[in-house]
Amino acid sequence: MLPKNFDRETFIAQLRQEHSRILPPHVEFAVEDGWLQLIADRLRDAETILEKHGWINRAGIRQIKEKFGELRIYIRPRTEDESYPDELAAEMEGLRRVVADNSAYTCEICGDLGEIGNFGGYYQCLCPRHADQRRAWIARGREGDIFHD
């Protein structure tokens, strides 16, 4: 659960500062707050892997988003004509799986235990409270605030 005084902008600004070697300033965080700690943890892992292989200055985050209810962090070589060596590619694939697996049971809204559900054709990982709120919002004709306390 996120603390009551959680400030998204401050948290993201700290991530940008801590991970400036791989996180360009233009990359959007196209996810809800519940996944921000997962992102922070995986950015540290990504830097460790890239540094180990001598790629810390040759790769960067391209996109952070939700897709089919799972978190996606796209980390690619900085130039289009480069590709990861096999060992690095395998480690980056392992990191991709960890990101997807962890997000598949973490509520995107609050960070509590959740599961992926289909909400009117939109897949999202939500805890029971936020899943109920999304269902109620759909039943109201998608009017008003989706997630309310």
Image: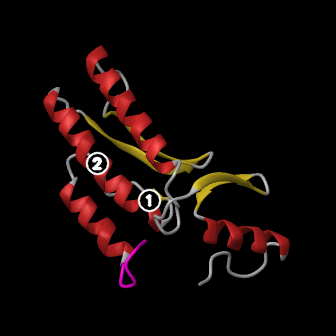
- Tell me if residue 35 comes above or below residue 89 in the rendering: below
At which x and y percent is residue 56?
18, 36
Q: Residue at x 31, y 69 (%)?
A: 11
Amino acid under label 1?
A: Trp
- Tell me if residue 21 comes above or below residue 92 in the rendering: below
- Left or right? Give the position of 27 relative to 84: right
- Left or right? Give the position of 20 relative to 109: left
Q: Looking at the picture, tell me which residue is in the foreground, 81 or 116.
A: 116
Q: Which residues are magenta?
A: 1-6
Q: Mark 2: which secondary structure? A: helix
- In the picture, the disc for residue 35 is 1
At which x and y percent is residue 142?
79, 72
- Left or right? Give the position of 146 relative to 11: right
Q: Residue at x 35, y 21 (%)?
A: 81
Q: Quadrant of residue 145?
A: bottom right
Question: Is residue 105 located in the magenta-colored stretch of the structure?
Answer: no
Q: Residues within 10 Å of mark 1 (few under 14, many from 20)?
A: many
Q: Quadrant of the C terminus?
A: bottom right
At which x and y percent is residue 26?
37, 56
Q: Residue at x 20, y 61 (%)?
A: 17
Frontmost of labels 2 and 1 is 1
At which x and y percent is residue 54?
14, 28
Q: Mark 1: which secondary structure? A: helix
Main secondary structure of the magenta stretch:
loop
Q: Earlier in the sequence, mark 2 or mark 1?
A: 1
Reading the image, the residue beneath label 2 is 43
Q: Looking at the picture, tell me which residue is in the foreground, 80 or 124.
A: 124
Residue 94 seen by the camera: yes
Task: Give the total of numbered labels.
Answer: 2
Q: Quadrant of the N terminus?
A: bottom left
Q: CA distance from mark 2 to mark 1?
A: 12 Å
Amino acid under label 2?
A: Leu
